[in-house]
Amino acid sequence: MEAWLKFRAPGVNLEIGLSIGQLIFTALNKVEWALAFIVSVALFVRIGQIPSVLILILFFPLVLLIGQTFYLLPELKQQAKHKIEGKLSQKSSIHIYYIIFELIKVITLASAGYMLFKL
């Protein structure tokens, strides 16, 4: 939600909005990695008590996070840099992929949370 809301604030032009977005997405990515580490350690500690299907479900968002961190975010940063510099950029569906990855992560993490409560 932050991504499109910031552009509606008075005085926020494209360059400022993109700069803010870069900072926020970088910070959020670091938080996601910290949480992924915590969940991984918790799973490792309880490895014999957690159903393998749940471990597999939790592995999927990690794979998506890796893809976001090492492919999608660098591409989005490059696009933002080009727009800030006033360069023309090609049409890209990177934003759509990022949103799809986020939706899949939310669904799989919610499913895993539900499964944990049922244990």
Image (tube, grey):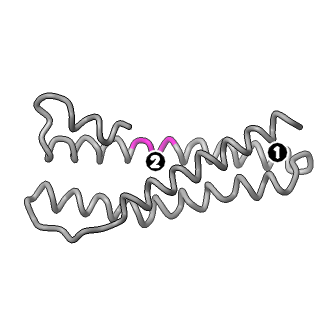
The N terminus: image quadrant: top left
Q: Secondary structure at mark 1?
A: helix
Q: Amino acid at mark 2?
A: Asn
Q: Secondary structure at mark 2?
A: helix
Q: Give the percent coordinates (x, y) of residue 44.
A: 79, 50
Quick one: label 2, few (<14), some, or many (20+) residues within 10 Å?
Answer: some
What is the residue that sits farthest to the top in this orientation?
A: 10
Q: Marks 1/2: CA distance?
A: 24 Å
Q: Which label lies toward us, 1 or 2?
A: 2
Identified at 73% across, 39% down, the residue is: 113
Dominant secondary structure of the magenta stretch? helix
Question: Which portion, as a residue range, is magenta?
Answer: 27-31
* Label number found at residue 29: 2
* Label number found at residue 93: none
Mark 1 highlights which residue?
45
Quick one: label 1, few (<14), some, or many (20+) residues within 10 Å?
Answer: few
Identified at 80% across, 41% down, the residue is: 115
Identified at 10% across, 31% down, the residue is: 11
